[in-house]
Image (cartoon, rainbow, N blue to C red):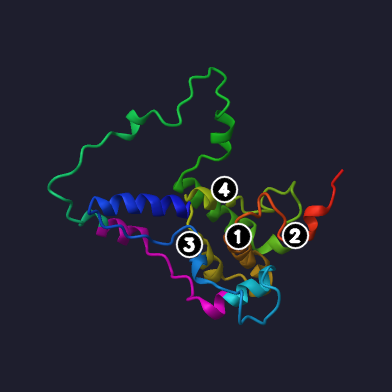
Amino acid sequence: SRALDNRRSQVLEKLNVKVVSCQSCLLHDIELLNLRKGYHSGYWGTVIPFRKACRAFLPRPPRPEDPSELFERLDNVELPTLLPHSIPVEDLKIGRTESSSKWHAPILKRFPMSTDDAQRQMKAFFANGFGLYDECRNMADQDMATSKLSVHLRFGTLSPLELYWKILDSDVEWEFKRVFARRPFWRELAYYLLHTFPDMPVKSIREHYEKVEWE
C-alpha cells in the first residue's frame, strides 16, 4: 500500500500537485521504528517488548480531534475556483452485484461498514464487555466476549487512535483493562513484522524452517 501511495504521489507531483501524506491507519508510523540495533529490552517480536520500544523511540499517539470541530474546519475551507472534471461515485459502478442470490446481504447485515456502526459497536462493548474482557475473551459463545471492532479498524471506519484513547480514558481499573489495552499493539506489531520481513507471507522468518516438511 505504501508503494502504491508513492507511485501515486510521483504522478501527482509531476502534475505540480502538492502531496501531503498523513499517518492514520496505525498508532505509529512503523517506518520510523528501527529496532535492528541498539535495543536490549527483550525480543521485540512479542508484544510487551514491542510496546516498550514504541514508547521509548516514538512519540505518544496523538489524541484525535473532536469530529464536530474537524467538520467545522472543513466547512470553512476555501475550495479552488476551478475544479477538475470528475465523475460521481454512483457512476463508477464499483461494488455492485447483479446476482439475484444477494450473497452479500448477510455480510452487510453483520458488518454494515459505516462509522455509525463502528461507534455503536464500540459504545456497546465498552458499556457491557470491556471490563470483563480479560476473563471472557476466550468464550466465543458470549456476545460481548470480544469487541468486534477489528473489521472497522481494518477498513478505516474506526480510527485506532480513537480506540487507543477510549481505552486510556475509561474509568475501568488498569488491572481489568490491561489485556485489551495491548490489543492495538498486537495489531501494530503485525504490521511492523510485515514491514521488516516483507516475504513473511510466503517465507519463514527463521530460514531453517524452510527445510521442514509438513504433512
Q: Earlier in the sequence, mark 4 or mark 3?
A: 4
Residue picked out by circle 4: 151
Magenta span of residues: 54-73
Verify CB contact (< 8 Å) between mark 1 and mark 3.
no
Verify CB contact (< 8 Å) between mark 2 and mark 4.
no
Residue picked out by circle 3: 162
* Secondary structure of the residue carrying numbered label 1: helix
Verify CB contact (< 8 Å) between mark 3 and mark 2.
no
User: Callout 2 environment at 10 Å: few (<14), some (14 to 19), or many (20+)?
Assistant: few
Residue picked out by circle 1: 187
Query: CA–CA distance between discs 2 and 4?
Result: 32 Å
Q: Amino acid at mark 3?
A: Glu
Q: Amino acid at mark 1?
A: Arg
Q: Earlier in the sequence, mark 1 or mark 4?
A: 4
* Secondary structure of the residue carrying numbered label 3: helix
Query: CA–CA distance between discs 3 and 2?
Result: 38 Å
User: Callout 1 environment at 10 Å: few (<14), some (14 to 19), or many (20+)?
Assistant: some
Q: Amino acid at mark 4?
A: Val
Q: Earlier in the sequence, mark 1 or mark 2?
A: 1
* Secondary structure of the residue carrying numbered label 4: helix
Query: Residue 10 appears at what percent x and percent y?
Result: 33, 53
Residue picked out by circle 2: 207
Q: Which of pointers 4 and 3 indicates the residue nearer the eye?
A: 4
Q: Is residue 67 magenta?
A: yes
